[in-house]
């Protein structure tokens, strides 16, 4: 049977051909999964469209009817879409099938979640080790100074002084061991760098002048030179000691206040993304827009974990005393909406504080009038 020229529209556009193919795939998905009830009329029109196209029976009227029924099909299968079906369900090509976008997403997020977890554990262990060394050094140094003062200033019996000397020697050994480990700890964040121990100009000049004064004597006192050199070495050693301790404390504060909360927030965001990804794959609703949303969620989660402490009032911090700062950072990364709610609350409070002075002035003006 021949058709009139005004009824034929020639070859269909690539977009319509793609929609026809998408309709077949949606019909197959519904039939295979049984999550929605197919309409016989809609199914007939969608299936016939492919064969009419093959038999060159396509027309404007056929295309209109097809598009109207495709719209009905899309509503039947919603929230599943052709994009989500293509992203989650593999297309069979012979015996094998190519990995889907959802499979790539699962692999990517799983891999980087494990990487984030390993980095977090490494950083946490590094922080705890440095914190313990710094705390031990501070405690041992104070005990050592107290015992040294007792031995230097107090007149104590020999039987009491001997135990103090033994205790002092033990503390010196502990101090040296902790200090050596702390220097190795500092080398990691400084990439192998060490402190030079160079003396400030004033002390260096003072040392040189004292040395010249000793040499000006006709008889050089070797004992004085030895004591001067010993004091100089002690000064340099203490400078390096305190430089290591101060720098370690600064790095510990940075780790505790910024790096670790950020990493905990990032891990919380990764956990949220994996959970959401599992839900969307199970419900066949994962699409490319989900991927964009997940990547943004990772950024927001990391930032949320880091800055949550900035927005907590003292009474709010007391209410959350049962949670450690790192646990709070993890929760903010997992549910960053809580942080946004807190920020909105602060902004509303600021607006009210700004508006109140203006309202009070207008009220005073009306009272005077």
Image (cartoon, rainbow, N blue to C red):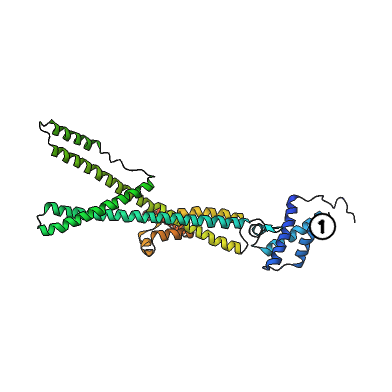
233 w.r.t. 140: above or below:
above
What percent of the width, then of the height, locates residue 144? 21, 54
In the structure shown, which secondary structural element does the residue marked by tag 1 occupy?
helix
What percent of the width, then of the height, locates residue 67? 75, 57
What percent of the width, then of the height, locates residue 332? 45, 59
* Crowding near the residue tagged with mark 1, few <14, some 14–19, many ≥20 C-alpha atoms within 10 Å: some
Between 136 and 200, the one nearer to me in the picture: 136
Visible in this render: residue 304?
no
Q: How many labels does the image show?
A: 1
Left/right placement of residue 83 relative to residue 366 reads right
Visible in this render: residue 282?
yes
Q: In which quarter of the image is the N terminus?
A: bottom right
What residue do we see at 12% from left, 52% from top? 153
Between 367 and 92, the one nearer to me in the picture: 92
Q: Which picture quadrant has residue 207? A: top left
Q: Which picture quadrant has residue 93? A: bottom right
Left/right placement of residue 231 relative to residue 31 reads left
State the residue position of label 1. Answer: 52
What percent of the width, then of the height, locates residue 212? 16, 32
């Amino acid at each position: 049977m021949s058709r009139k020229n005004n009824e034929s529209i020639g070859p269909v556009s690539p977009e319509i051909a793609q929609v026809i193919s998408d309709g077949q795939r949606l019909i197959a998905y519904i039939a295979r999964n049984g999550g929605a009830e197919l309409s016989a009329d809609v199914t007939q029109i969608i299936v016939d469209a492919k064969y009419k196209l093959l038999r060159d029976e396509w027309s404007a009227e056929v295309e209109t009817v097809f598009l109207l029924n495709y719209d009905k099909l899309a509503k039947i299968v919603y929230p599943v879409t052709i994009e989500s079906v293509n992203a989650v369900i593999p297309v069979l090509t012979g015996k094998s099938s190519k990995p889907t976008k959802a499979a790539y997403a699962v692999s990517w997020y799983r891999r980087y979640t494990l990487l984030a977890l390993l980095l977090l554990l490494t950083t946490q262990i590094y922080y705890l080790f440095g914190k313990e060394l710094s705390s031990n050094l501070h405690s041992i140094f104070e005990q050592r100074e107290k015992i040294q003062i007792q031995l230097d200033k107090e007149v104590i019996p020999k039987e009491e002084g001997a135990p103090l000397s033994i205790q002092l020697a033990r503390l010196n050994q502990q101090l040296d061991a902790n200090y050596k480990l702390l220097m190795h700890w500092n080398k990691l964040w400084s990439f192998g760098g060490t402190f030079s121990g160079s003396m400030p100009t004033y002390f260096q000049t003072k040392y040189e002048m004292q040395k010249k004064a000793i040499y000006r004597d006709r008889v050089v006192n070797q004992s004085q030179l030895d004591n001067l050199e010993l004091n100089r070495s002690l000064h340099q050693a203490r400078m390096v000691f305190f430089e290591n301790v101060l720098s370690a404390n600064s790095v510990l504060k940075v780790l505790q206040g910024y790096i670790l909360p950020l990493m905990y927030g990032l891990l919380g965001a990764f956990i949220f993304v994996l959970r959401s990804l599992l839900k969307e794959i199970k419900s066949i609703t994962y699409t490319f827009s989900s991927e964009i949303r997940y990547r943004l969620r990772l950024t927001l989660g990391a930032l949320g974990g880091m800055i949550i402490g900035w927005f907590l009032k003292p009474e709010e911090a007391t209410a959350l005393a049962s949670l450690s700062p790192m646990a709070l950072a993890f929760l903010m990364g997992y549910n960053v909406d809580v942080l946004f709610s807190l920020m909105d609350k602060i902004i509303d409070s600021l607006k009210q504080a700004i508006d109140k002075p203006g309202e009070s002035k207008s009220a005073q003006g009306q009272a005077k009038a």
